[in-house]
Image (spheres, helix red, strand yellow):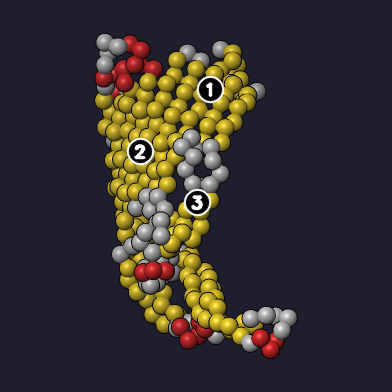
Amino acid sequence: EYYFGPNEGNSVSVTYFEKDLEDFLQLDEFTRDVQVLIDDTDPDAGFEDIESEIRFWTNASTRHIKGIEVSGYFNFGDFAPNFPFLKDFSFVPNYAKITGDQTNPIFDQNELALGNIVQIGEQLTDSLTNQAEEIYNLQLFYEWQRLSVRLSYNYISELQRSPSSAAIDTLEYDAEKENWDMSVQYRLFPSRDLRFFVEGDNLGNEPSDQRFNGSDPNLYIRRYETIGARYIAGIRGSF
């Protein structure tokens, strides 16, 4: 960490980390063809083949994670002392990049077809499941007397859900996510913690959940969910 500026009120922090994990939970899947009646009210109509997807949780073997996190706090007034009104504005960025590798279990396909989970080996992959590679958020604050305003931007990069040992066209991902949030608070009394507030989440109306297969997020969409922007207003305090 490094502090600077008047009264050392600004800061920059850089953190490097590594972590080893064992026996963490991992969601695997197996797809097979099964025969079902074409018409369950008429057995003479015959059978047809449909694709059945089976999902199950297992304990993956090992995972090695490494990454770097950079954060800071900056008061605009310290950088432009000739503009006194800027002392009420602050900027707080945070960025993390996470990479690593893991071993994925290999299962006996014949046993899976019979409903038995039998592990026969392991495969080392250079990607992590259920872990975004980049995460960052940017926050802008304005604080003047009893008024406080915060505007924030949050971003999560594409996230791989299925193990890399799966076929490329069946790899499942969460699409990258970004959203804007804002909150305004006003302290009603100088000597009491009673505040009127207004909050807005997902101001850009971004999808809350977008999952796809393959390499193109717009080609094979598996799930898409959106709830729109959300606004809340009220009074909160402590007594």
Q: Which residue is mark 3?
A: 209
204 relative position to 46: left or right: left
Dot 2 and dot 3 residues touching (CB under 8 Å): no
Dot 3 and dot 1 residues touching (CB under 8 Å): no
Q: In this picture, is 136 found above or below 29?
A: above
The foreground one among 164 and 208 is 208
SS at mark 1? strand
Q: Residue furthest front?
A: 45
Q: CA distance from mark 3 to mark 1?
A: 29 Å
78 relative position to 228: left or right: left
Dot 2 amino acid type: Asn
Marks 1 and 2, the one that precedes in the sequence: 2
Q: Residue at x 26, y 10 (%)?
A: 82
Q: In this picture, is 166 found above or below 97?
A: below
Q: Quadrant of the C terminus?
A: top right
x and y, in percent, of residue 94 in the image: 35, 38
Q: CA distance from mark 1 to mark 2?
A: 23 Å
Q: Residue at x 50, y 17 (%)?
A: 147
> Few, some or many C-alpha atoms within 10 Å of disc 1 (few <14, some 14-19, many ≥20)?
many
Q: Which residue is mark 2?
A: 94
> Few, some or many C-alpha atoms within 10 Å of disc 2 (few <14, some 14-19, many ≥20)?
some
x and y, in percent, of residue 218 in the image: 41, 56
Question: In the drawing, what numbered circle is on residue 185?
Answer: 1
Q: Quadrant of the N terminus?
A: top left
